[in-house]
Amino acid sequence: MTCRLPSSRTPFPGRRRTARLRHGRACRGVRCARAFTLIELVVTISIIIVLVSLTVYAGVALIGRSEVRRTQDTLASLDQAMREWELTASRSVSLGENDIPSFAAYDINEGELVNPPDFAGLPMGYADDVTRKLIDIIARSQPVKEIIAQMDPKRVKRDADDYLVILDAWDKPIRAIHPGRDHLGAMEVFVAGDADDDGTIEGPDIQPSFGYGELAHGVALNRRIFFVSAGPDGRFGNLSADADEPEEYAQAGDNIYSYKPEQP
Ligand SMILES: [Ca+2]
Ligand SMILES: [Ca+2]
């Protein structure tokens, strides 16, 4: 296509030039060049923004999936470590109370559990103390030592009290939830409530104000300890939260488990 340069013979040179530019064509010298209109520029930039957003979203989703997978691997290692210890010892790690004579023999004394110092920015409670004592007990056995040695070193830390702490992929401590000791039957219904299906109390929640064991994280099945990560949101939440605390309940929604416990 040929274009004519505006000349002094053109009656209204400015108007003619404007008309050409409006159609996206500008002439320079003897050659005509196609220029972008404003609409074309906006459309092009919008497409670029959409493509970049999609790429970033896909990247974030991939990273999120890989963190979930790494956390699942860590939970599986802990579950395997627990089973190895139980096979070697021919029993489970027991949780008892020093003021109940029939449960004088136990590995973890619930009466001595404390709220350990804050770690990794999370408020800690009984469940964290149970976890670090449990890992301390099982990590003394050779098969468990070997399993921990094979875990990603970034997932294994020591806390301020020199206890081993196992972290999820978001660097938050994983919790072990103990099924609790045997329920003593009718004599303690008023103290410990009804027995769980596996004949245990809801542990370690005998003092709910310190608690956050099975009541908050889920009820263990068949007396098996389970491990739980707070998930991507870094909060364990509370599965027994009242209806007026929907956020606490929702925070448990993305938690990741070594096996899925029952709803409390
Ligand atoms: Ca229980
Ligand atoms: Ca969570």
Image (cartoon, grey):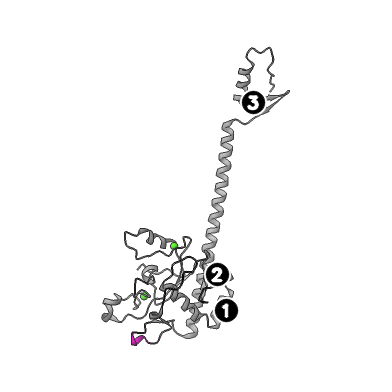
The residues tagged by marks 3 and 2 sit, at their Cα atoms, a distance apart of 62 Å
Among numbered discs 1 and 3, the one appearing first in the sequence? 3
Among numbered discs 1 and 2, the one appearing first in the sequence? 1
Q: Is residue 41 visible?
A: yes
**Looking at the picture, which amino acid does disc 1 mark?**
Glu
- The circle on residue 25 is 3
Q: Are marks 3 and 2 in contact (CB under 8 Å)?
A: no
- Circle nearer the viewer, 1 or 2: 2
Q: Are marks 1 and 3 in contact (CB under 8 Å)?
A: no
Secondary structure beneath dot 1 equals helix
Q: Where 11 falls versus 99 (above or below)?
A: above
x 56%, y 76%: residue: 147
- The circle on residue 155 is 2
> Is residue 237 left or right of 22 when viewed as pictured?
left
Magenta span main SS: loop
Q: Nearer the viewer, residue 124 or 33?
A: 124
Q: Which residues are magenta?
A: 98-105
Q: Is residue 102 magenta?
A: yes
Q: Is residue 212 magenta?
A: no
Quadrant of the rendered image holding ligand 1: bottom left
Q: Quadrant of residue 104?
A: bottom left
Which residue corresponds to mark 1?
146
Q: Nearer the viewer, residue 21 or 87?
A: 21
**Looking at the picture, which amino acid does disc 3 mark?**
Arg
- Circle nearer the viewer, 3 or 2: 2
